[in-house]
Amino acid sequence: MSDATPAEAAPGDGDGAGMAAAEEVHGAPVTWSCGQQVLHPTREQYLDVVKALKDEGFNFCVDLTVVDYLAHPARRLPAGVGPERLELVVNLLSFEGRRRTRLRVQVPAGDPVVASLFRLYPGTEAMEREAFDMMGVRFEGHPDLTRILMPEDWEGHPLRKDYSVGRVPVQFKHPPETR
Amino acid sequence: MTTHDQDTAALAAETSEGVQEMAPRSATESAELLLEQGAVLRLPEGVTVDPGDFNVEVNPDETMIINMGPQHPSTHGVLRLMMELDGETVLRTKPVIGYLHTGMEKTGEELTYLQGGTNVTRMDYLAPLHNELVFSLAVEALLALEVPERATWIRMLMSELNRLSSHVLWMATNGMDLGAVSMMVYGWRERELVLSFFEKATGLRMNHNYIRPGGVAADLPPGWEDDVLAICDAFPPRLAEYDDLLTGQPIFRERTEGVGVLMPQEAIALSASGPILRSTGVEWDLRRDMPYMFYDQVDFDVIVGTYGDCFDRYAVRLNEMRESIRIIHQVVERMPRGDYRSQDKKVTPPPRARIDESMEALIHHFKLFTEGFKVPEGEVYTAVESPRGELGCYLVSDGSAKPYRLHIRGPSFANLQTLPIMLRGGLVADAVAVISSVDPIMGEVDR
Amino acid sequence: MGLEDLNHNFLTARLEDLVRWARSHSVWPATFGLACCAIEMMATGAAHFDISRFGMEIFRGSPRQADLMIVAGRVSQKMAPVLRQVYDQMMEPKWVISMGVCASTGGMFNNYAIVQGVDQVVPVDVYAPGCPPGPETLLHAILTLHQQISTGEITRRREETGAGAELALDAPLPGRGVLHAPSHVAVGRPH
């Protein structure tokens, strides 16, 4: 599984549709978005794929975030990948290969649990806490999964689509005395 | 009450904004402690250093936990650190963030792509132009929009000037934190030079909303070459002066050399980027290694340090300013004529003069600013090298005029994770030097 | 009268005027930088704009030594209790400048995370508009405050503006939606 190598050069830009999921990297279907390689492992494959990618030279975890697709369920995914409400997005970077790759993992909202990348990339510690705080995805194996940005006693996960923006209506108040 | 509970109760900081606690020592004995350098940082075995470094025999009764921040003059904003001290030695540190959480990613979903710049520019308020740049690059990637050459060169000019103003402000605050207060005064003086040019070109001193999807908001003002070259002429002799003032100063060296040391493998494992990563000797600069805009056409050096201590981080930033001036000189020479924004009617409003003449132009202008333009469905990640490291933007579009999801990868957010490892074993007085050398901008950490 | 025996100069004035004059010329701000505005606040303190022309260059790290809080930047729900605590630690008489639109009204961030106006947490004397206000705007706000101090009542106690330490607002804040004001914030509103 780990001997599979990804396509060396990005194919032509613009095939954002990426429905041609003939390619696979470490068992995960590959699409291309704006010339960027995107892997779609399942939740079960996720940790193994990241491990294989790390062995392959992706030594730097740039970013980890979650997208809530509640209001936009019909997004483009390769054949065989069933859309779920939440999607974990991990951006990896290889210093040697000077290239990036991105993983998109489908996470059902009913059971939002994913393996933590902490043992592979300790730098994901804060990012996973942020994802938990903002989106309510739990990371198994994370050493300290607590709220990071919101107060500890906050209710709800603000970046979810069903969480209101929390607008406060603008009140017009007359000045205390007229001038 | 078990001992575990007692420990927890003792260690939980009673604060009004909820309980943030350090894991009790009894829960982090032996093997766990091996994984732990600092309360947050638990590196995997392969990355951690020698177990002999750990003072496992710490008596929990003799350590004390102090809070630094969130309102502290040298935490650079509203950073709060919980530090466990043994005498004056820092054992564990836990950065507590979120005191400036602004909900910008949520607000970003409410604003159109044209308005989005006003939102992202307020994240890293010392490098607002980089934030606008990375957002614009992401939108343009989704639109598959070509930006005119002049616009790209203007963007490069502005982002390098912004790097100057950001680093010079860092030198000012770093000097102040270490007691070199005259550096504070000089740093702000130099920053005003750059800001007055920004004000002339963009209309604002900060939070410019100047770089927009499709180009920049306005062309450079007449006589901009003279202004920029005046900045370029003014900086080098003054940088040399600061070099003398700080580099040659025994107190400054004593306080920075060998303080807050970070190893390259630790920096990489912790996703640290920018001057922090480069100070450890890792040559990684997105401008050179994964060039965006026209950075592959200009000549500059990537500055790296050797020891990864506070002094190296200072030296890296000082010399990066010199490299920025080199880049700015080349940009001024090579600035082409042409449009400063794309002529794609879909994203670019009509020129002001046409609005007075043509009803269609007025309607077009109105529609563009009220409804915005639609961006094709898709997702993209773009990154630029901001003064603090890799600034990334992950943008998801559902085909409407507003981003479906806007996520900004703030370099300071990841860089802050290096604090526990850099502070461990140092003196509490050095904490100020280390925090300052990380250059965290809380607006970007908390977003 | 007895004054003839004094052999040096003297000045007569109302005590109240002298106190007000002295206060308005010796305002010590606390460093309460939060966000972008803090940078402009620091710029105001630096050489170019030089706040020491108004006798205010000493920014105190400790709120107990300060009598002016310049709330420079957006106040998040998490920061509001801290802000209130710092305010309570300051000695009377004390003043507050709300610097920037985020501190004054929430600004463009009308969302779950930001307190929509710092006057929900502490009483504000002067609002400085701008995003961020330039140093000139802040200086103008400071001069306005000086004017207020030198013409205001010297024994003004602010029960009515909610500055008392234990003052709490019973009625819930309007329009919080799904949110709640942190229950531990003693919330007061100026008139």
Image (cartoon, rainbow, N blue to C red):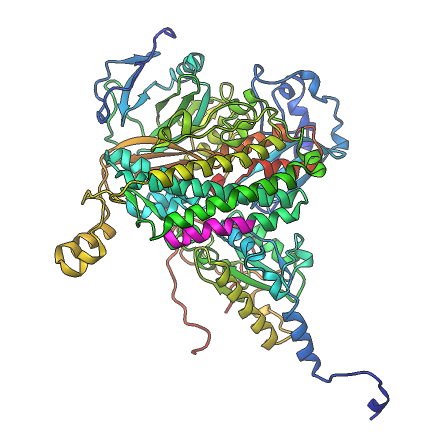
Relative image position of residue A18 (x, y in whole percent): 23, 22
Residue B29 located left or right of residue C97: right
Residue B207 shows in this picture: no
Residue nearest the viewer, comparing A5 with B33: A5
Does B115 sit above or below residue C14? Answer: above
The residue located at (66%, 70%) in the rendering is: C23
- On screen, C86 above or below A173? above
Dominant secondary-structure state across the stretch colored magenta? helix
B284 left or right, relative to C154: left
| Occupied quadrant, residue B264 | top right
Q: Nearer the viewer, residue C171 or B341?
A: B341
In the orientation shown, which residue stands out farthest toward the bottom? C1
**Picture coordinates of residue C73, whole percent (x, y):** 50, 53
Say which residue appears at 58% left-offset and 15% top-offset. Answer: B45
In this picture, which residue range is highlighted in magenta? Answer: B188-202
Does the magenta portion include C35? no
Q: Is B201 inside the magenta-drawn segment?
A: yes
